[in-house]
Image: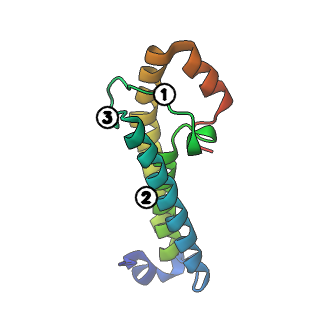
Amino acid sequence: MNPIPYFLFPKLNIIHFPYTLFGIIFITSGYYIMNYSSKIFNKKETTFLLEKPKTFIQTGFYKKTRNPMYLGMLFMILGESILFGNILSFIIPIFFYSLINFFCIIPEEKIMEKTFKKEYIKYKNKVRRWI
């Protein structure tokens, strides 16, 4: 861990020790969510890529969020930002959220709608994209 912004821009530090340690909770939670969800993907033998999926998963964390793996990654990045404690470190999770939302999730949802039609639209109306 190299919190360069914390030391280079100390006036921009918004979270101080020991409160920065709350980042560990986000990192651990994010890792668990991401790992558990990817195991479900592997078990159902579906794809991680932007191609036609074999299976439509609605179990585990997929009951609460349509994108638990991305959510887990976001939690991990947010946790690192909290550990660093500097306002500049929070640019990275915002950038990640925007990038994933527009260049991964939206195209994936179009593929899911095309593949699973009304079943996915019903799921999409019931379960939020993030949380």
Percent x, y of residue 98: 46, 43
Is 1 on the left-hand or right-hand side of 125? left
How crowded is the residue under tag 1: few (<14 C-alpha within 10 Å), some, or many (20+)?
some
Q: Which residue was labeled with disc 1?
A: 56
Q: Quick one: label 3 or label 1, which is nearer the N terminus? A: 3
Q: Quick one: label 2 or label 3, which is nearer the N terminus? A: 3
Task: Give the residue drawn at x 63%, y 45%.
Answer: 131
Q: Are marks 1 and 2 in contact (CB under 8 Å)?
A: no
Percent x, y of residue 102: 44, 35
Secondary structure at badge 3 equals: loop
Relative to 105, residue 51 above or below: above
The disc placed on residue 66 is none
Task: Give the residue drawn at x 38%, y 25%.
Answer: 54
Q: Quick one: label 1 or label 2, which is nearer the N terminus? A: 1
Task: Give the residue drawn at x 48%, y 27%.
Answer: 56
Q: Which residue was labeled with disc 3?
A: 49
Res. 110 in view: yes
CA separation, marks 1 and 2?
A: 31 Å
Residue extending farthest right: 126
110 or 116, which lies in front?
116
Percent x, y of residue 33: 52, 54
22 or 97, which lies in front?
22
What is the three-letter code of the residue carrying label 2?
Answer: Ile
Q: Which residue was labeled with disc 2?
A: 92
CA separation, marks 3 and 1?
A: 14 Å
How crowded is the residue under tag 2: few (<14 C-alpha within 10 Å), some, or many (20+)?
some
What is the three-letter code of the residue carrying label 3?
Answer: Leu
